[in-house]
Amino acid sequence: MLLVVVSYCLWNIQCYTERLTVLQGSTAFGFRILIPKGFSIPTGQCGTVGKDLRQLFAYEDMNQFSRGFPMKVLLLPEAVESTGATMYCGSLYYQRKRSRTLIRYDLASETLASRRNLPHAGFHGQYPYSWEGYIDIDLAVDEQGLWAIYSTSKAKGAIVLSQLDTESLEVKRSWETKIRKNSVANAFMVCGRLYTVASYTAANTTINHVFDTATKASRDLSVTFKNKYRYNSMVDYNHTQRKLFAWDNFYMVTYDVRVGGASK
């Protein structure tokens, strides 16, 4: 298994193809995380970015999810700030509303497991993506663990990327890129590389930048990416299925990841 993962991570992303529109939701904004078999599927929804969001909807399987009837609704201990939440090893990770505080919520015990401020991180509209929405801190997961995508006053709005300890939420390592956070629509991690999406409204846009934490090098890309419903407020990578999941204007959409061309 390790050899397969390493081999996969030696290649660059070549393209994404829309695979399936899973569900038409009741809200324009939200986040959706698909986790491995054996866990429920959690989804958060917020009708208007900036309003309190504390509910987490859990689904038994994809069939139940597609029908839109949750088996359980969890009440989170603190309100969520925008759509930057993610899941890793049975915990939900999210940014507390109007703060740089990160929270780890354990799904098994339904309790707050840890919290920590992300040092110097901008929040509540200081350094959002181009679609705004207060997504100043975007949490992501890939084959190498848990990441925070954000910016600081020192970085002057450029994306800062930090790898976090999954238990304590402490920053393990950080990288400062030259990619302006408000110039891109969204970002996600694959194999220790940061990828950015150029537009959230253009039907035909691109994956336009990549930053490699192993080499500390960045370069421009032009990989086709489609926003079928023309308002994509979340893009997350699921490393167990090697797919992207997006929340695109009331619709939750999945994309297959295709790779090609060895990384330099």
Image: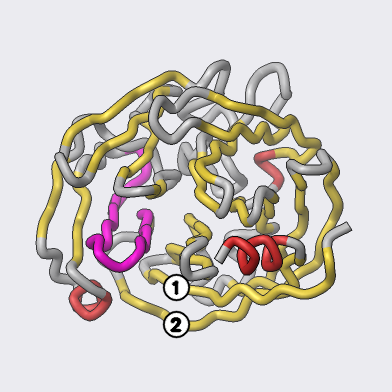
Please determine whether, in this image, residue 49 is positioned above or below residue 103: below
Q: Mark 2 touching mark 1, by CB under 8 A?
A: yes
Q: Quadrant of residue 106?
A: top left
* Quadrant of the drawing holding the C terminus: bottom right
Q: Nearer the viewer, residue 57 or 180?
A: 57
Residue drawn at 25 percent across, 41 percent down: 53
Q: Is residue 208 left or right of residue 201?
A: right
Q: Is residue 161 left or right of residue 34?
A: right
Q: Amino acid at mark 1?
A: Val
Q: Amino acid at mark 2?
A: Leu
Residue 255 appears at what percent x and percent y?
53, 74
Q: Quadrant of residue 64?
A: bottom left
Residue drawn at 76 percent across, 66 percent down: 11
How would you rate the neighbour count of disc 1 (Cα within 10 Å): few for under 14, some for 14-19, many for 20 or more? many
Q: Is residue 13 left or right of residue 115?
A: right
Residue 22 appears at what percent x and percent y?
36, 77
Q: Is residue 18 shown in magenta?
A: no
Residue 95 appears at what percent x and percent y?
39, 33
- Identify the residue position indicated by label 1 in the image: 253
Q: Nearer the viewer, residue 190 or 205?
A: 190
Q: Is residue 35 shown in magenta?
A: yes
Q: Magenta span covers which residues?
A: 30-50
Residue drawn at 30 percent across, 48 percent down: 90
Closer to the chain start, of discs 2 and 1, is: 2
Residue 257 appears at what percent x and percent y?
61, 73
Q: Secondary structure at mark 1?
A: strand
- Identify the residue position indicated by label 2 in the image: 20
